[in-house]
Image (cartoon, rainbow, N blue to C red):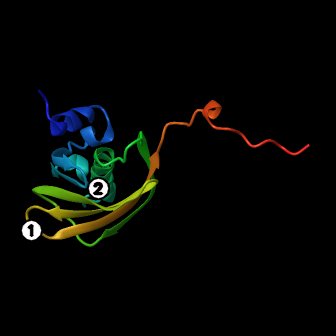
Amino acid sequence: MSTRIDQINASQAGSLPGLLEFRWIEAGYGLVRGRFEITARHFSPHGLLHSATIVALADTACGFGCLASLPEGASGFATGELKTNFIGTARQGAVSCDARLVHAGRTTQVWDAEIRSEVTGKTIALFRCTQMLLYPPVNAHSHPTRSEPS
């Protein structure tokens, strides 16, 4: 029987997180932890860890966390806003991410993620995103409609 982590890791095949070789360690309500080993694919042409790799790690962590934390009746989410502050970099070893739910509303969730170099232990980026929660369409025939005045 596969675990939630096995399912999450397997679901990435052929998508950006899979191509970047992200691996998820923990995923549950309000918390996701993941990492990747730094390879040449993660660098920009001028030799620094590409900022898009960090954003992708944090956004993916928050997305999997949102799915694990949906309120009853919600069917999915869409990212409404994201922001990243880059405060360092890494050139070797691995990068890890801890994403935490800081607001769990009926229509939105807000997630914060901290991204660290595993070699130095230093934070290299802080990330925040707002997820807009999606619900199945309401059956128009189940609710009375307001009549237009004549």
The quarter of the displayed image where residue 130 is located:
bottom left
The N terminus lies in which quarter of the figure? Answer: top left
Quadrant of the snapshot with the C terminus: top right
User: Which image quarter: residue 125?
Assistant: bottom left
Which badge, 2 or 1, comes first in the chain's sequence? 2
Mark 2 vs 1: CB contact within 8 A? no
Residue situated in front as seen by the camera: 35 or 139: 139
Helix, strand or loop at mark 1: loop
Image location (x, y in percent) of residue 114: 23, 64
Residue 58 disc label:
2
Tell me what residue is drawn at x 20 percent, y 37 percent.
Answer: 9
Q: Is residue 140 visible?
A: yes
Question: Residue at point 29% right, 56% down?
Answer: 58
How far is the residue under mark 2 from the one under mark 1?
A: 19 Å
The amino acid type found where label 1 is placed reads: Thr
In the figure, 24 relative to 7: above or below? below
